[in-house]
Image: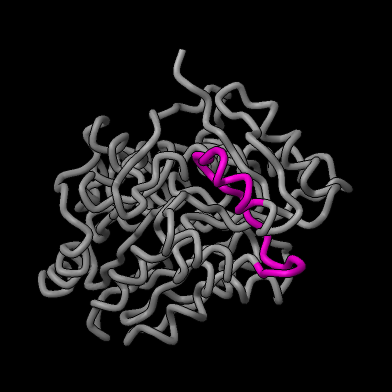
Amino acid sequence: MSRKIRVLIVDDSASVRQALADIVGQDPQLEVMATAADPFVAASRIQKEVPDVIILDVEMPRMDGITFLRRIMAQRPIPVIICSSLTEEGSATLVQAMEAGAVDVIAKPRMDQRQFLIESAVRICDAVKGAAQARIRSGASAARHRPVEKKMSADVILPPPGSRAMTRTTERVVCIGASTGGTESLREVLEALPVDCPGIVIVQHMPEKFTAAFARRLDSLCGIDVKEAEDGDAVLPGRALIAPGNHHMLLNRSGARYHVSIKDGPLVSRHRPSVDVLFRSAAQYAGSNALGVIMTGMGDDGARGLLEMQKAGAMTIAQNEETCVVFGMPKEAIALGGAQKIVPLGRIAIEIANVRQAA
């Protein structure tokens, strides 16, 4: 049996530490190495034993989480997951956390809603397993783990695509799916795109409220427009729409024009938003007019959807292992035969530009 992933939990709230410890401790692949009420206690604990993953609060006494994160990355890189409240103030820290080297962000578990707590447990444990695999400068990673819980498919949101692909139009659309490591990887891709690139729709696994801050950050850095998607938003050249956290996003079509629908629903492939849901809708409504891109991330969300897009006539590509923070989602898509091309991160923007030129 492989060694369990050891987790250090750092949060000044005793109730949050206990909730996180209970969630982590219930997963047979994880164990709580220790908990700490502030970064100074955590630093002392790390000197004795190095964890595989740190779950880190932001607002803490004596030293804030972002400062501690920067010190960890400068002195002894360890995969860090930022754990923050679902508030506008909390989401504002996302930019700093990702720039400082955090591999993922999760919402603090809320004890007042049973369903939220159950889904939080799924998200938190998956985030820890993904972080344990992440390439942190040295490229070291823990043994790969596959989730064992039963997963729902995109069938619960959208019926399987028919045998006929949508007729080609002059409008092209790019669909991108990413998870662990995707925030900075998406930035690199979107920054490199020309302002007249095809319309882009993106699912990045991230909690609600955080996606709005993420979109604003990308919009400030990129030549193209980037926004958190709203129901009915048009998919336009030079614009990227990011699925709002905790909601599925589907691609729809009216005549030759595309727009998005934002929907509630159960977790699909253990996620909401789900890449599989977006890709399936693209297979149905865009067909050969689409390009599907699956990037770095833990698990297999998007693998089946990318294959559906390919069967519907879409171009499909997967990010290669060497440039992935976690080679999970692309690996699964490649294994299913859904990826026509396997390319490094730096090539993805070029492939998108080539779609524009071929239109």
Q: Percent position (x, y) of residue 304?
A: 36, 36
Relative to 186, residue 238 above or below: below
Extreme residue toward the right, this view: 112
Q: Residue at x 44, y 83 (%)?
A: 219
In the figure, 202 relative to 230: above or below?
above
Which region of the structure is painted magenta? 42-64
Left or right: residue 271 versus residue 339 is right
Q: Is residue 207 left or right of residue 198?
A: right
Closer to the camera, 51 or 286? Answer: 51
Q: Nearer the viewer, residue 98 or 281?
A: 98
- What scheme was used to colour the molecule? one colour
**Towards the viewer: 210 or 225:** 210
Height in image: 148 above or below 7? Answer: above
Q: Position of residue 240 (x, y in %)?
A: 40, 74
Which residue is rendered at x = 46% and y = 76% of the image? 234
Name which residue lies at 22% across and 59% down.
345
Residue 48 is a magenta residue: yes
Residue at point 56% right, 67% down? 211
Above or below residue 151? Residue 184 is below
Find residue 301 and report its image quarter: top left
Q: Position of residue 250 (x, y in %)?
A: 49, 57
**Quarter of the figure with residue 255:** bottom left
Q: Where residue 13 appears, x then y in whole percent?
A: 82, 54
**The C terminus lies in quadrant:** bottom left
